[in-house]
Every structure is written in C-alpha cells, then in structure tokens.
C-alpha cells in the first residue's frame, strides 16, 4: 500500500555540506518510498526533480536528463503524492505564496509536501555543476552556479516545507525544484510568478531519515556542525 | 515482521523544551514500533524505560510504575531489539564506555540503540517531577530534579546514541535510562560504574520522526529555536 503520510529522506544536507557527494542509494530503491520529490544526483550532478514516479536531473549546463533506476543519489526526499487540499493560484509570486501558506496552514512545525502544476509568467532557477574527486565542500561547489530563466512556461514545482528544527538534516523552510512540461528546463527554484496553477499541499506525519550506514566515508566524516548553519545559508539561499 | 533497523521517535525534544508536555500518542501505538526504548509520560511524569515490550515510568518520588497501553506519551524513542554485537563489560564507568564505543564503532553520524544488562557497582539517576498546567518550559520544569543512587544493583540500561546533527529533534550524543531487575529503582542516568554486564549495540539505518500533526497546541507553538541548544544543555545534562 502506498504510504501517503511519510516523507522519506536519504542522506542529509549536512553530508553534502561536508562534501559527501557520492551516490549511496539507487534511485530504484528511493522510488519505492515515493513518486514525487527532489534531490541531487551522484557527484552533485544537477538538481533532481521527481514527478509521477519519473526522476530527472537538471544539470549545470541547463540540460535535463531522465534518470534510470540504477542511478545512485547522495541526498533526496520523496513522498507519495495524495493531495489533501488543492487550490487555484493566480498571479502570485513564490514569496506571497509562502506567506499565504504559512499564515493559513500553521505549518511551521510540520513537514509538508507541495506540488504546483500550471503556467508561470516567470520562472528563475539555478543548477549545480557536477563535481569531481577530491570533492570540495558544498560552499565551494556552489560558489558558481548557472542560473536560468523562462517566461510563460508550463510545468511543475515540487518540494517541501520542513520545520527549521530539522535545518541541517534537510533545508529548513521551503525548498522546491521545477521541471517544465516538455522536460527541457528546470532546476532549483530561486523565484517565480504564477500565471495560473493548481497547488496541492500534503501535511506529512512521519519523516523517515535513512542513512548510508555501510558507507565508510560517511561513517568516518567529521560533519563540522559548528559552521553548518552559515554554510547552508551560503550554499542554499 | 519486526523492523530491527529503525529507530521510531514520537515527538521531539524541542517540543518538551517549549513546554509541550501533553501526551499525544498512546503507548500501545508506540509499542507497535519497538519493544525497547526511553521517553517520558504525559505531563512529564517521570523517566520512561521500555524493556522487553513493557514500559515503566520512574517518577520524581522515585516510585516505579508500570504503564498501560492507553497511557499517552509526549516524547519517546523505541526500536526492536536485535543485538548485532554483544560484548562483556567489567568495571568500566559510563564515560569510559562512551569513549570506547565511539572510538571503536565510528558511530558519530549514525543512530545506535544500546542495552546493557548486568550488575552495576554504582548507579546514579534522576527523575523529573510531574508538571501541571499551565506547563512551564523544560528548563523551569527540570530546575529541581530528585536524584537517586544505588550500589550493587542489577538491571538494564536502555538508550541511544544520536548524531549531534539531530540535537533538538532528540538528545545529541548518548541518552540512556535505567531500570533495575526488581522494577523499583531507575531513572535518567547521570553516571554509573559497571560491575559485570553484557552490552548490545545496534546501528539503526532509519530514524522515523513521527509528529502529532493533529494537535493544535503543537501546530501553533513557537519552538524558540534560537535558545534551544542552551535550553537543552541546561535541562538534559
């Protein structure tokens, strides 16, 4: 049975911050836990978006590549889509939408899955470049990130709101990626304006944190927690 | 099938820190996810220990009370015991044991379940007093905590090592409770010296964070994350 109340996360943001970019879970196994989600690919090769059970990575070149089940991912979050509440959006920006959702849903302390399908009068994204070993840390890896913009684009926003308590394990607050309908434009969202769209929000009761416990590099790594929040602010926002 | 690779946690330490002491999950439901664990009871009424599927609370008076499945708990962690590795301990203190485990197991980044059965030449515990509404925050509630000591006591230490990344969601580092064999002494462990014992350690691949998403007090609460680490240090150590 599809578990529609659980956010499943493999790896942590802190692992990326520390430079652990190696894929540690096959996408096929990740997709047993959800058909919708976001993440990154092995070697930090792009921004991953999962819609309707199909994963894509948006690479630093802007190219969108569908991923096969054997692809390994270092960090990803998925859930099974089951919209508890949908509503129509017209003309709002991402900042206005965030404020609306937070004011109406009292969601500060819970995990929420979000998907928005429709047309966007503006969509502004970025994508990280693939890294090579020896891997730098995330701050260094994301210092230069190509940005992309399209107007009047139709597609899907997929992502999560996570309580700030879990900042470090994941991104606290909203974190969402985009992929267009023709699957040739997307990335980590910087900002957008909705033209017309439907939004689905799903409050998730469980957050499963799955860790690559047999990965020796992960087991031995010093996670440098003292500078974690500063590093995340620099890399993710 | 018993899931022996998962730590299941209901509620968060941050919720206690903020004064959310109301039980939000029946013990019967909690025990579907594990037969071994620790936590606290409704209204912060004591230190909970779960061994072999039976839960007890050690109250501020020192009294040990077995709990029934309808008891509600605000915060608890459980797993199904399946010792992957056991070893004998003779004459070590809790501090020596922690150092040994961390040095040998490279456990800093993973969740580990621990159970120690045997005799202890010294066991020093404390237990929190039941609180009444309007609930104070955890720092105020734990300012005065009765302490208990016994020598040459046999019983079980139950608890977890959690990565410091998850400090706030839970207690980062080691957190363990004790209950003696005759079920009339125990509590939150301050320190101990093993006489002779067997220790079982279990590296857990998943941490399920379950949240009381339908509890309106929880949904509306400001978690005061800025002072969280300071508050935890004051209340838990």
Image (cartoon, coloured by chain):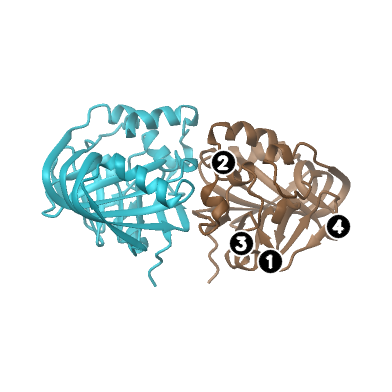
Chain colours: A cyan, B brown
Closer to the chain start, of discs 3 and 2, is 3
Residue placed under numbered mark 4 in the picture: B184
Q: Which mark is residue B168?
A: 2
Badge 4 crowding class, 10 Å Cα cut-off, few under 14, some 14 to 19, many 20 or more, is: few
**Is label 3 or label 4 in front?**
3
Do tag 4 and tag 1 residues touch (Cβ < 8 Å)?
Answer: no
Q: Which mark is residue B25?
A: 3
Closer to the chain start, of discs 1 and 2, is 1
Chain label for disc 4:
B
Q: Is residue A152 left or right of residue B193?
A: left
**Is label 3 or label 2 in front?**
3
Do tag 2 and tag 4 residues touch (Cβ < 8 Å)?
Answer: no
Of the pair A14 and A172, the residue shown nearer to us: A172
Kindly state the secondary structure of the residue where label 2 is placed. Answer: loop
CA gap between label 3 and label 4 equals 25 Å
Residue placed under numbered mark 1 in the picture: B53
CA gap between label 2 and label 4 equals 31 Å
């Amino acid at each position: 049975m599809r578990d529609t109340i659980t956010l499943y996360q493999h790896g942590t943001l802190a692992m990326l911050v520390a430079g652990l970019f190696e894929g540690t879970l096959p996408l096929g196994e990740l997709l047993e836990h959800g058909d919708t989600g976001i993440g990154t690919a092995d070697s930090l090769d792009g921004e991953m978006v999962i819609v309707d059970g199909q994963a894509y990575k948006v690479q630093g070149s802007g190219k969108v590549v569908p991923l096969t089940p054997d692809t390994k991912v270092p960090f990803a979050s998925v859930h099974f889509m089951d919209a508890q509440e949908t509503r129509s959006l017209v003309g709002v920006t991402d900042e206005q939408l965030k404020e609306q959702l937070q004011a109406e849903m009292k969601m500060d302390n819970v995990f929420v899955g979000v998907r928005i399908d429709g047309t966007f009068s503006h969509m502004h994204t970025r994508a990280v470049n693939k890294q090579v070993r020896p891997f730098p840390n995330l701050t260094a890896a994301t210092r230069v990130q190509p940005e992309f913009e399209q107007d009047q684009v139709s597609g899907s926003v997929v992502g999560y709101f996570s309580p700030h308590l879990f900042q470090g394990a994941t991104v606290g607050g909203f974190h969402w990626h985009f992929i267009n309908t023709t699957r040739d434009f997307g990335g980590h969202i910087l900002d957008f304006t909705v033209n017309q769209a439907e939004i689905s929000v799903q409050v998730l009761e469980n957050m499963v944190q799955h860790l690559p416990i047999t990965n020796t590099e992960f087991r031995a790594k010093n996670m440098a927690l003292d500078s974690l929040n500063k590093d995340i602010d620099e890399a993710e926002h």
